[in-house]
Each structure stands twice: as structure tokens, then as C-alpha cells.
Image: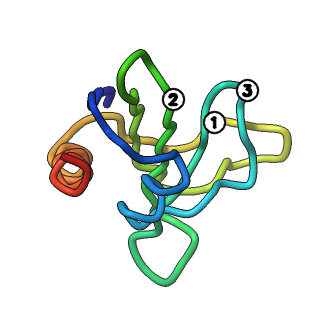
Amino acid sequence: MEFSITNINKSINDIMRTIGYQPAYFQKAGEFSVIRKMGGADYPRFHLYIKESGDGFSFNLHLDQKKPSYEGSTGHSGEYDGSVVEGEAERIKRLLV
């Protein structure tokens, strides 16, 4: 799920702390990759890409259900929409607006 928030006067690190996320083990150039676990285990977890865009930030959120199934795979059982992902997006928006 993609969404944007404008007029945020915070750094990406401040945004990450405000919404309760931690850095992911990998990063893409130009994007900050962060995760938030849903329980005590590594999965399921929310995975969020944050990118500066104009006068705000763009967000790309999905839910990782499990880690990649086999070595060398980057794919996972991910959910990119639905009530759980929409609820998390709304939580993030409330915390940052």
C-alpha cells in the first residue's frame, strides 16, 4: 500500500522512532527500509519503505507473512492491501499528522 504525507518536519530517523519501526537489515539507494514486528517472532512483520518526496515523504507498506522460502529468494508471502495493512497505514498517518 502506497501513501504520502506532506509537511512533516521530522527526519527519517525521527519518523521511524515515532511510528515504532526499526531499520531493516538491507537498504535500497534513496529509500529507508524499516520493519515492525507484530509479536515476539521475526514474522509476521510490517515492512515499510520511506522515501523523501518534494515537501514530504512517500511510504510503501506491506505485511511480510514469512521469510523467503528458499536460499537466494527475495520473495515472501506478502500482503500489500487488506484490513490489517490499511489499519497500520492509518496508525502511521495518525502518528505523523
Give the residue displayed 49% in from the left and 26% down from the top.
52
> Helix or strand or loop: what does disc 2 sit on?
strand
Residue 14: give x, y in percent of width and height.
47, 57
Q: What type is the residue that disc 3 sits on?
A: Ala
Disc 1: which residue: 75
Left or right: 88 as drawn, with respect to 2: left
> Helix or strand or loop: what does disc 3 sit on?
loop
Disc 3: which residue: 29
- Circle 2 residues within 10 Å: few <14, some 14–19, many ≥20: some
Give the residue displayed 39% in from the left and 27% down from the top.
58
User: Sequence order check: which comes first, mark 1 or mark 2?
Assistant: 2
Disc 2: which residue: 51
Give the residue displayed 31% in from the left and 31% down from the top.
1
Q: Is residue 90 above or below residue 49?
A: below
Residue 5: give x, y in percent of width and height.
27, 31
Q: What type is the residue that disc 1 sits on?
A: Gly
> Helix or strand or loop: what does disc 1 sit on?
loop
Along the line of sight, which residue is nearer the eye, 77 or 20?
20
